[in-house]
Image: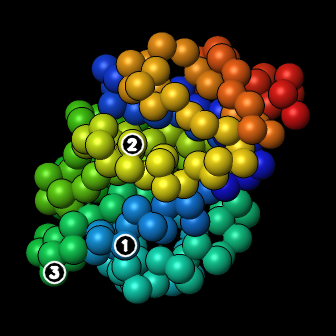
Amino acid sequence: MRHYLYIWHDPAEQMIVASGIEFRDFLPALLDAGGVLLLKGDARVAQTGMLHVPRQQLPTLASEDIAAWGSHAWADYADDAAAALPPPDDARLAEAGYFARHGTPQHQPRIAVLRNRFIAYAHDDGWYLKLFYSAWSDVADFLAAAVPAAIATLDMAALQRGDAGCWLQGGVAHAEVKTHDIDSVLNRRL
């Protein structure tokens, strides 16, 4: 994680927007997943076909210069889903392509065949993240493990309600606007 965290939550969309969270911060949360399906990116460790990266290769993926890819998108998949992944058909390719291009799912944040918990769209790894989730508890568990106390304590109840954005840095938390314009927040705060 970077030395700060900007984050807000839209409960209706089952989405958090953040800056400061990098792909490598997800590794502990993905230890019980089968891996990730790269919807957009340029990973050297991706398997052929649907560009999946099995759990064993996630540390290698996290060590790549993901920020150099520009934008990337991924969804985790259940441990036993990899063997059952059907070949991509036109509908699945269209939905994955839509998410990779727009950063928003066409229908819902869950891809049934993957049984995913997360689907993420990021730009310049750590700079901008839109994370869609299937269950709030997965986000809460991830953030509890990923946000170091040195940055500040995140008010999880307020975040879950979607009250306001939050800026955490140097052990202090501040209310912040909810916006996709990460640059405007970072220009004021950094």
Q: Which is more toward the observer, 90 or 111?
A: 111
Please report the residue visible at 31 percent of the width from the left and 20 percent of the height from the top: 12
Amino acid type for the residue under numbered disc 1 = Leu
| Residue 49 badge | none
Residue 104 in picture, x, y percent from top left: 40, 35
Marks counted in the figure total: 3
Mark toward the start of the polypeptide (1 vs 2): 1
Q: Which residue is mark 2?
A: 140
Would you identify the image quadrant in which residue 169 lies? Answer: top right
Mark toward the start of the polypeptide (3 vs 2): 3
Amino acid type for the residue under numbered disc 3 = Ala
Q: Which residue is mark 3?
A: 83
Please report the residue visible at 65 percent of the width from the left and 65 percent of the height from the top: 66
User: Is residue 97 in view from this perspective?
Assistant: no
Q: Which is more toward the observer, 161 or 51?
A: 161
Q: CA distance from mark 3 to mark 1?
A: 17 Å
**Position of 119 relative to 14 (above/below):** below
Q: Which residue is mark 1?
A: 31
Q: Secondary structure at mark 3?
A: helix
- Count neighbours of disc 3 (C-alpha within 10 A) and say few if under 14, some if 14 to 19, many if 20 or more: few
Left or right: 80, with 4 as reference point: left
Residue 15 in picture, x, y percent from top left: 40, 32
Which part of the image, by quadrant, shows the N terminus?
Answer: bottom right
- Is label 3 in contact with label 2 (beta carbons under 8 Å)? no
Amino acid type for the residue under numbered disc 2 = Ala
Residue 144 in picture, x, y percent from top left: 47, 48
**Position of 85 relative to 174 (above/below):** below
